[in-house]
Amino acid sequence: MFINELSKSLEEDKKLPDNSLILLDITDTYITPEVRDLAKEQVELGKDKKFKVAILGASFIKRVITAALNKNLYFAKNKTDALDWLVKQKK
């Protein structure tokens, strides 16, 4: 279930160093109140740690909601596009 994976991801993200690069695939996921709350917490952590995040599979509404919370996000067209963007962030 996505909520369980998101919870695990949040705990793992807390251990990552600042300026980490993250590839997040949210294809075929649904936003529930629980997912939204966890996602907000994860976005705040990402802002504090200055994570750069490439996101795959975001619908228009997911993009609008997420982009409003954090500007260090990139909505990729595919995995290659996401990885290319992340590599550029390290330069």
Image (tube, rainbow, N blue to C red):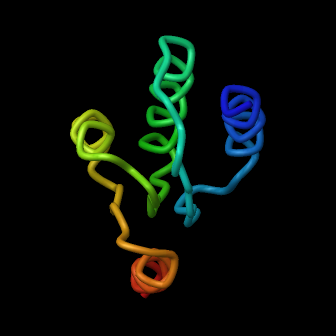
User: In the rendered view, does 85 fall on the left or right side of 15?
Assistant: left
- The single residue placed furthest to the top in the displayed view is 33
**In the picture shown, does residue 81 fall above or below 75?**
below
User: In the rendered view, does 42 fall on the left or right side of 2?
Assistant: left
| Nearer-the-camera pick, 33 or 90 | 33
The number of numbered badges drawn on the structure is 0
Image quarter (top left, top right, bottom left or bottom right) of the N terminus: top right
User: In the rendered view, does 2 fall on the left or right side of 33?
Assistant: right
Residue 55: quadrant of the picture: bottom left
| Nearer-the-camera pick, 21 or 84 | 84
Image coords of residue 57 (percent x, y): 44, 56
Q: Residue at x 25, y 37 (%)?
A: 61
**In the picture shown, does residue 57 fall above or below 8?**
below
| Nearer-the-camera pick, 17 or 84 | 84
**In the picture shown, does residue 81 fall above or below 49?**
below
Q: Residue at x 44, y 75 (%)?
A: 78
Q: Residue at x 45, y 53 (%)?
A: 50
Residue 14: quadrant of the picture: top right
Image coords of residue 65 (percent x, y): 27, 33
